């Protein structure tokens, strides 16, 4: 997979030994966040449904960095799994300070007249309910600790503008945007900040090579994004440099939602 752009040196944000839980952390944006957080002095728990890949990534990072990385198999649509992931972070590292809710699926490309209840339920269970559950249990723990915290939800540019050909995904991601605004204002006085990032199409193995040129032309920058570009803005948002930002939905989409 050829990168659209090369990595550049970015500003360094010291996460000061914080503990981060990342759902969907075995691949894509979640994995890029885990990598960036570990390099920024945070311990990380990767929660992902793919046990083999999640454990492999955690072992790789554990060997590579001085900070620690653990893995727990997690289906974010199951409440007990989410609770267990939060508890592992607390039991292993003593606290939970950061959540990145990045687990998600695309589902079938159906417009509303073609949509099935099966696809609608599956997509919303992961992309919407899964985010709600992760936010709920992370925030409960942060309230218990009384030290504030930072939550990042992964929405999409298609949560800000409609994608008629995938109604379940678009609706779920729009729900994540308003969930973020509600949670971000509800707990602002307790120092718990909740924001969401709305990426454009990102260059991961999930994007078929034959579709990339069409996606490039769809973005005003005429390219698609890279996972490390999204991880960079997320690292800023969970750092103290962003401590006056909450309830925000931030597009990182090469200008797509501006036209």
Image (cartoon, rainbow, N blue to C red):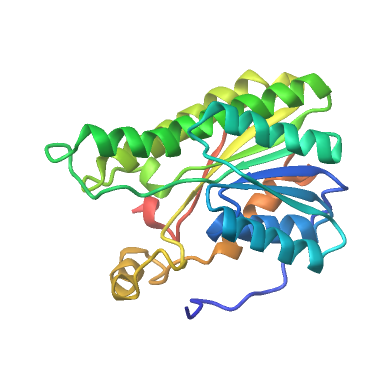
The image shows a total of numbered marks equal to 0
Tell me what residue is drawn at x 48 percent, y 81 percent.
2
Tell me what residue is drawn at x 53 percent, y 67 percent.
226
Pick the residue in front: 115 or 157. Answer: 115
Tell me what residue is drawn at x 66 percent, y 32 percent.
84
> Taking 99 as reference, is 15 left or right?
right
Tell me what residue is drawn at x 82 percent, y 49 percent.
15
Q: Is residue 68 above or below residue 78?
A: below
> Taking 37 as reference, is 24 left or right?
left
Q: Is residue 215 above or below residue 187?
A: below
Q: Quadrant of the C terminus?
A: bottom left
Residue farthest toward the left in the current orientation of the protein: 113
Q: In the image, residue 236 lies at what x, y percent? A: 70, 51
Q: Is residue 245 visible?
A: no
Q: In the image, residue 117 lies at what x, y percent? A: 23, 32
Q: Is residue 34 visible?
A: yes
Pick the residue in front: 101 or 178. Answer: 101
Q: Is residue 189 above or below residue 83?
A: above
Q: In the image, residue 145 lies at what x, y percent? A: 83, 24
Residue farthest toward the front in the current orientation of the protein: 52
Q: In the image, residue 158 lies at what x, y percent? A: 36, 46
Pick the residue in front: 239 or 30. Answer: 30
Residue 139 figure quarter: top right
> Taking 234 as reference, is 257 left or right?
left
């Amino acid at each position: 997979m050829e990168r659209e752009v090369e990595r550049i040196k970015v500003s360094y944000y010291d996460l000061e030994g914080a503990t981060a839980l990342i759902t969907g952390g075995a691949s894509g944006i979640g994995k890029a966040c885990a990598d960036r957080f570990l390099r920024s002095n945070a311990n990380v728990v990767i929660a992902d449904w793919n046990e083999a890949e999640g454990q492999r990534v955690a072992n790789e990072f554990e060997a590579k960095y001085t900070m620690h990385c653990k893995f727990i198999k997690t289906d974010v649509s199951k409440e007990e799994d989410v609770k267990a992931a939060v508890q592992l972070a607390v039991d292993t590292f003593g606290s939970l300070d950061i959540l990145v809710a990045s687990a998600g699926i695309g589902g079938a490309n159906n417009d509303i007249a073609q949509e099935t209840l099966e696809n609608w339920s599956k997509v919303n269970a992961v992309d919407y309910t899964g985010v709600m559950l992760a936010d709920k249990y992370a925030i409960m723990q942060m309230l218990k600790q009384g030290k504030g915290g930072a939550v990042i939800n992964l929405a999409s540019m298609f949560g800000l503008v409609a994608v008629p050909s995938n109604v379940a995904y678009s609706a779920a991601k729009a729900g994540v945007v308003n969930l973020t605004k509600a949670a971000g204002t509800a707990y602002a006085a307790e120092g718990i900040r909740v924001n969401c990032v709305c990426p454009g199409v990102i260059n991961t193995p999930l994007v078929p090579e034959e579709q990339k040129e069409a996606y490039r032309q769809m973005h005003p920058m005429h390219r698609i994004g890279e996972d490390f570009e999204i991880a960079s803005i997320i690292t800023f948002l969970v750092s103290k440099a962003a401590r006056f930002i909450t309830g925000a939905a931030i597009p990182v989409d090469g200008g797509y939602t501006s036209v």
